[in-house]
Amino acid sequence: MERFLEELLIEPWRIPVIIAAAAGIYLGFMVLAKVFGTRVLMSLTASDAVVVLMFGAVGGRVILGHPPTLAAGLVGLATLMILEAAFGTLRRFTGWGRGLSRQPVLVVLDGEMLPGAMRSAHISRTDVYSSLRRSGLGSLSQVQAMILEPTGTMSVIRTGQPLDPEVLRGLKRA
């Protein structure tokens, strides 16, 4: 019974260590996502999935420490959830955190790829063509605008659709 409780519980001195590790991993991941872009979230190829899984494995290992226990996991998860809620609130009410948030990026305009924007967003021609096919379009000439959203998804506005300039407001490279 004692061994069973050891596997579930946590020494009180480890709680602040887990909280600090979770905060560090959270902030580190946010900075890395800002630097490398949201492309990895766009379409999970096999290599992208491996990277995402490795992020989770490394992050979890750092947060939980040794030995991992149920209580350590719960403290780590609660810390990540609280951080996400806190950053969401800060973004909404103060604008703080916009530096870590990605901006939407215009990558195609009037059927023409924008190479500078694609480079800064880490988007390849293959990614653009993949999004084109997912949108049911057969030609780049059918695209009025293609936007990489902060979520990693691509929004496609077809040629011939009315386009309110407000839709493009705040876009990087617009």
Image (cartoon, helix red, strand yellow):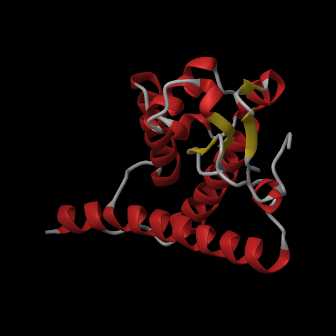
* Residue 25 x %, y %: 62, 50
Pick the quarter of the image with the C terminus: top right
Residue 52, compared with residue 59, is above or below; it is: above
In front of the other: 100 or 44: 44
* Residue 14 x %, y %: 52, 63
In front of the other: 37 or 142: 142
Pick the quarter of the image with the N terminus: bottom left
The part of the image, by quadrant, that contains residue 114 is: top right
Report the residue at 43% width, 27% height from top.
45
Residue 143, compared with residue 174, is above or below; it is: above
* Residue 139 x %, y %: 56, 24
Count of numbered badges drawn on the protein = 0
The part of the image, by quadrant, that contains residue 92 is: bottom right
In front of the other: 2 or 83: 83
Report the residue at 51% width, 38% height from top.
55
* Residue 8 x %, y %: 28, 66
Report the residue at 32% width, 64% height from top.
70
**Farthest residue toward the bottom?**
93
**Farthest residue toward the front?**
160
- Answer whether residue 13 is visible to the viewer in this image: no
Report the residue at 64% width, 35% height from top.
143
